Amino acid sequence: MVNIGVIGYGYWGPHLVRNFMTTAGSQVLAVCDSDRSRLRSLQSSHPELLISTDYRELLADPALHAVAIATPVATHYDLARDALTAGKHVFVEKPLAASTREAETLVEMATRKGLCLHVDHTFLYTGAVQKIRELIGTDQLGELYYYDSVRVNLGLFQSDVSVLWDLAVHDLSILDYLLDEYPRAVSVTGQTHVDGNPENIAFLTLLYQSHFIAHLHVNWLAPVKLRRTLISGSRRMVVYDDLEPSEKVKVYDKGITLNGHPESRYRALIDYRTGDMWAPRLDNTEALGRQAGQFLRSIETGEVSPSDGQAGLRVVRILEAAHRSLQERGRPVRLDAGI
Amino acid sequence: MVNIGVIGYGYWGPHLVRNFMTTAGSQVLAVCDSDRSRLRSLQSSHPELLISTDYRELLADPALHAVAIATPVATHYDLARDALTAGKHVFVEKPLAASTREAETLVEMATRKGLCLHVDHTFLYTGAVQKIRELIGTDQLGELYYYDSVRVNLGLFQSDVSVLWDLAVHDLSILDYLLDEYPRAVSVTGQTHVDGNPENIAFLTLLYQSHFIAHLHVNWLAPVKLRRTLISGSRRMVVYDDLEPSEKVKVYDKGITLNGHPESRYRALIDYRTGDMWAPRLDNTEALGRQAGQFLRSIETGEVSPSDGQAGLRVVRILEAAHRSLQERGRPVRLDAGI
Amino acid sequence: MVNIGVIGYGYWGPHLVRNFMTTAGSQVLAVCDSDRSRLRSLQSSHPELLISTDYRELLADPALHAVAIATPVATHYDLARDALTAGKHVFVEKPLAASTREAETLVEMATRKGLCLHVDHTFLYTGAVQKIRELIGTDQLGELYYYDSVRVNLGLFQSDVSVLWDLAVHDLSILDYLLDEYPRAVSVTGQTHVDGNPENIAFLTLLYQSHFIAHLHVNWLAPVKLRRTLISGSRRMVVYDDLEPSEKVKVYDKGITLNGHPESRYRALIDYRTGDMWAPRLDNTEALGRQAGQFLRSIETGEVSPSDGQAGLRVVRILEAAHRSLQERGRPVRLDAGI
Amino acid sequence: MVNIGVIGYGYWGPHLVRNFMTTAGSQVLAVCDSDRSRLRSLQSSHPELLISTDYRELLADPALHAVAIATPVATHYDLARDALTAGKHVFVEKPLAASTREAETLVEMATRKGLCLHVDHTFLYTGAVQKIRELIGTDQLGELYYYDSVRVNLGLFQSDVSVLWDLAVHDLSILDYLLDEYPRAVSVTGQTHVDGNPENIAFLTLLYQSHFIAHLHVNWLAPVKLRRTLISGSRRMVVYDDLEPSEKVKVYDKGITLNGHPESRYRALIDYRTGDMWAPRLDNTEALGRQAGQFLRSIETGEVSPSDGQAGLRVVRILEAAHRSLQERGRPVRLDAGI
């Protein structure tokens, strides 16, 4: 049984509490938030919990094996560092930290102390993304051509981080999960429509060594909510629409076929292919519950999590470069190959 | 009565013939194509027409006042130049020419000779785009924030020009029509998935002096056809979906409202607004017919066409800069302020 | 403060408990279910509640002013009758009772004892249905032509009542709320696809004295979930799609206009009208909460509820006639005018 | 080579002319319409055709082997009878005739004279309906449960026939093609909203000997255009949406499974099944062209057409009974078993 303390009880914290309460193999012993008013109803319905406004109380509790951190990004580093120092396994909201340097330090600390560092890349644990990974893994899509995502709505403007850190992080973690290849450069444009605030709309392209290209489209100021990703390969193409109630993943037997010798590939030698469409049944288990299970397995068996600290670091590294490119109006920024 | 000769009778030529035949004030006297087989059925059903495989025959015919050119882009310059030299008004397929230099020369020639040079920017003449222009012109959208277009499908790969010249040209002409402002720079990324062929997927951002930003998303290798543009202003937002059978333009009374002094605009001072949605009735007259009418009025009354040579040049200038940015993986390329 | 006891803690009961707990002016003092296992977690999180497996314990409690009944239809009559006898106001799940005779008795009892009898016709309290009622009330639709509803999905087959009693009841209560007119006859067809079970698919037409017609389409065995109603008037038409995330109600300025003298209305005198479409913003407050408020106001001020016992009786009367028509393969069954 | 004359050159006639002109094995020699103005442009573009305002001229022409009739329903009988008498094969618009008696006479005449009588049941020749027939024929749907069609839009009100004869005829012909079983009774409700005109909205149920049930929903006064049919079987379910641009037919591996002995089929023994969805690629050849080919093959080889006179008669018989049921507000009208 893994004993968990949850730090941060705002929007996401209650979901973490509920999940670690109901997942077999874990129990929640303590919850903390700097704002005591948020904790009141929890205290009355769960009088057995240690309730605190000081996270250090949790870190000092030897009964806790792990903490789950659901606080603003800027605080992730300090909290995770202190937790690792106190010998706790750490489950932290995305993104892992506010800079590459912070993320690297956390990864290094966790490795050194033999503790699990897990980032909450929720989408990796959805039936939809797992099915897409399976399609790629069994080579049903063929050579991958592109990943093209639109993730827009009338969302809450954040004053500390741009829309990249809020929305693009989802696609970057999905790409990290689906691909073996790390991007070589990133080019980003965007704009703020509230003076003095960070960018509320951004367009991000990831460039790779291969022919693959990824493009993310994030926007807090859109009249309609869209969550649609096209993933194209030489063999088949996928439309992943997270707002579809039932058929979130559609696989199209569509595309082009190249005929003739490579050196003479000109227009006449491209054939167009249109076949069946297929929407596989997806596992509808709640993603957060499956993710909690992964965290517990990593702690108990050492199984490598697909959203471990390394994955979190890879994502933060891209976000940091993306921010730089955005400041320079799209100039491509190289990403260190060494990952 | 304006007498028209049509040069090029492939995919688009027959539409031009039909339109200039049926638009009041014009008649088609001659049609030419270098491939005689394309002209056969036209000849039998319209024996009164001058049918030719040599466009110079048309240019030499003093009965013709104007020619409409529907041939590959690479040939636009030579054909239009010869037609203007021969004293004919010119209606030419988009884009106007294959380079800024060519386009400038054509504009200069037409001006010097007092002839009309009209570019077939078809979308400007649709009920949808005209309604959007009216919404902007009557300040119903407020300060413009962004234009964000997705124009993708499994389209015919072209071997001579990239997807930018085939699809992005539509949005560039619409933007030219809707906005008073010319972009200051362009940043483009893209990829080819057929070795040796031009890019079949591209992402183009236009950066402006103001807070406005435009983004175009074009792709010949998508499993589904999408034609959706979000146009956002401080007052209202528009979703323009050209594939909707009836409600192509939806106007949302949605957005954010800023409260308090500009210097203190932080998160707490942004209010979110959600009101009614409204889909105005659109004029369903065929766009090509209305465009033919505009061309004839320009010839007869000197009325300035919104898709005249100047407009065509402005679009080609962006395409050329976009191509350069694409070669340099997104590096922003400045556009000459000189419009 | 109205003190409430909730009878039945299966699927719907927990919603009632939560709503009466959080609605200003009411509190829940007791909850009962014949299956003790369902009550366990409630007991631990709310130790202050009276928890019982015998509803008579609740009826005997003088502290309770009202009971809310969320049990199978077949038990509504006995429970409501006993509650009224015990002097409690009654809030009961739809449909009010299993037969017209039962419903009449309950209405008569409530009237005689001066108690509120309220039926949970939830849809009446949604922003969408209230907006449609407002459109009708302000004569924006003109003379009403038809109500045409499709309410299908892969739903839970019930073994005791047909799909009419489960799904059609929603539309019958909405119609009762929207219209001043009561139907004159009902014609119903349907089928069972599981031998020995009640009908899982049914088509119900309500015929009126006027030109109005209503048609309901209910089905437990459909591959997709649909909840779409067309409501047409001489002036405007409404599409009400309850599955649309934001624009649930769309108002079309579309229809026909009759010209000329009534006696000579033939084809040439019908004009077709196509104008704007408009989706009004809807109140998104939870319907159940608003309904709880209505029940409390009815108790405290005597305000007539739109889903009182009379409304519940009118709906049950149609269901009963519908069942008879269904047995006779569509033969129209008259409804007593006297309501 | 089959020589065709086309009678009626209004809305549909030009399509017939074009199709029989371009289908291999047929040529159009003559076209007739009582309104000479409709024929003018045809005459100028096709001076080789015999153009007439008197259909008897065509019937008298020994060069013609067959006539295609595209005139109002009320005239079908006279024209087809005269054509058969003159020894011509007949292709006639749907519905075959205005009454069962007329249809029977035509079928009997054609049989006696050994001529082909073909009804234009266009939908039978679409890729979508042919694919559905294949799914049924290869038992992929299992035992058929229901056919449920919605076919509504703001359509042209006809003053001579109700919406049944205009729209329901499509579904009746599709059902005739898909099923081996003929309905036993029909129950229809509907309403007119223009005094003195036939019904513009109608709801038709077909009742069968088996558990199968069909329901048609036709309406000329709807704010949106819908063409959606659900076809359900014990094994799989189909959604056929004719307005979908690409995936018109979707096959759902969804439904219920009955466990246990038939005599004990109660609720607990129904299992729900949700699997993949699949949209097969459809043949996109124009339906009318394929139908022309069928007509020619029937003439030349005697191959039985799925939309021959017998099929047309079966459809008219249902329409006639439907009309009677509609007059009696849904009373079920028996259909003669003998077909």
Image (cartoon, coloured by chain):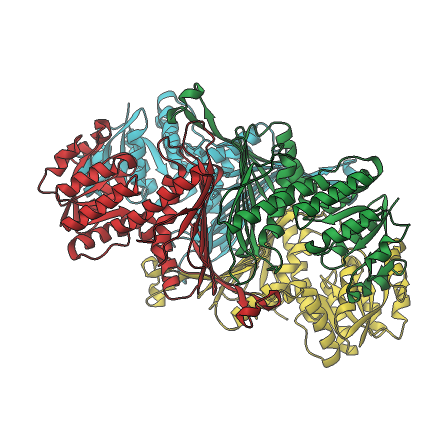
Chain colours: A cyan, B yellow, C red, D green
D28 or A132: nearer the eye? D28
Quadrant into which the C terminus of chain D falls: top right
Q: Position of residue A290 (x, y in %)?
A: 39, 30
Q: Residue at x 91, y 50 (%)?
A: D62
Is A148 on the left-hand or right-hand side of D93? left
Q: Quadrant of residue D2?
A: top right
Check the image and report above or below for A312 versus B39. Answer: above
Q: Position of residue B99 (x, y in %)?
A: 73, 61
Q: Position of residue C160 (x, y in %)?
A: 35, 32
Quadrant into which the N terminus of chain D falls: top right
B131 or B282: nearer the eye? B282
Is B162 on the left-hand or right-hand side of A14? right
Is D202 on the left-hand or right-hand side of B28? left
Q: Position of residue C146 (x, y in %)?
A: 46, 56
Q: Residue at x 21, y 49 (%)?
A: C23
Q: Residue at x 61, y 55 (%)?
A: D161
Is A5 on the left-hand or right-hand side of D272? left
Check the image and report above or below for B67 versus A5. Answer: below
Check the image and report above or below for B106 versus B302. Answer: above
Check the image and report above or below for A303 versus B121. Answer: above
Residue B306 in view: yes
Residue A9 in view: no
Q: Quadrant of residue C320?
A: top left
